[in-house]
Amino acid sequence: MSLAEHAAMKKPRRIKEMALPKLEVGAIAGMLVCSLLLYVFTVNQEARLNADQMEIRKVRETNVRLRAELSRRQSPDIVEARALLELGMAKPAEVVFAPQASIAPPVSARSPSLSAVGVAEGY
């Protein structure tokens, strides 16, 4: 084999050897970009998950508070106190004398007050 033939055979090899690293660099760059996008997506999803979990916790706390308030408002003592003091109602064995102008006695004439029987002003 002559030197010229040998040189002709080496040229294609060099081109091939140089093309292969470019392909590898492109593949590595593509994988890095995909990895970066996957990382950003994962961080974003984690932040959204944390926000959703915090919102669920707040809703559950509100639900517990509202259930407790509902239970308190439905207790027989509170219902009876409101009926007696706010609506002027009486127990079956009691007689209530109301002024002519209104059915329920004025607030100052009522006794006991709502706060005395454990009912908050806003109940």
Image (tube, grey):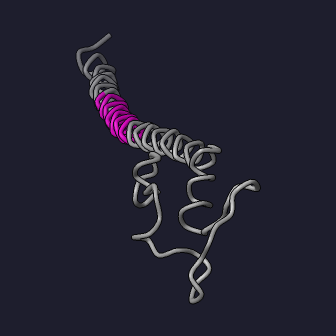
| Residue at 68% across, 63% down | 95
| Residue at 69% across, 57% down | 94
In the picture, measured across the screen, residue 109 lies left or right of residue 2, that is right
In the picture, measured across the screen, residue 28 lies left or right of residue 64, that is left
Q: Which residues are magenta?
A: 25-48
Q: Judge whether 89 appears above or below 18 on screen.
A: below
1 inside magenta stretch: no
Q: Which quarter of the figure has residue 99? A: bottom right
In the picture, the quarter occupied by the N terminus is: top left
Tell me residue 20's x, y (percent): 34, 26
Please tell me whether the stretch drawn in magenta is mainly helix, strand or loop.
helix
Total marks in image = 0
Seen from this angle, which residue lies furthest right?
A: 92
Q: Nearer the viewer, residue 60 or 95?
A: 95
| Residue at 62% across, 79% down | 103
Q: Judge whether 66 appears above or below 95 on screen.
A: above
In the picture, measured across the screen, residue 99 lies left or right of residue 21, that is right
Tell me residue 122's x, y (percent): 42, 60
| Residue at 31% across, 35% down | 36
Seen from this angle, which residue lies furthest bottom?
A: 101
42 inside magenta stretch: yes
Q: Nearer the viewer, residue 100 or 69?
A: 100
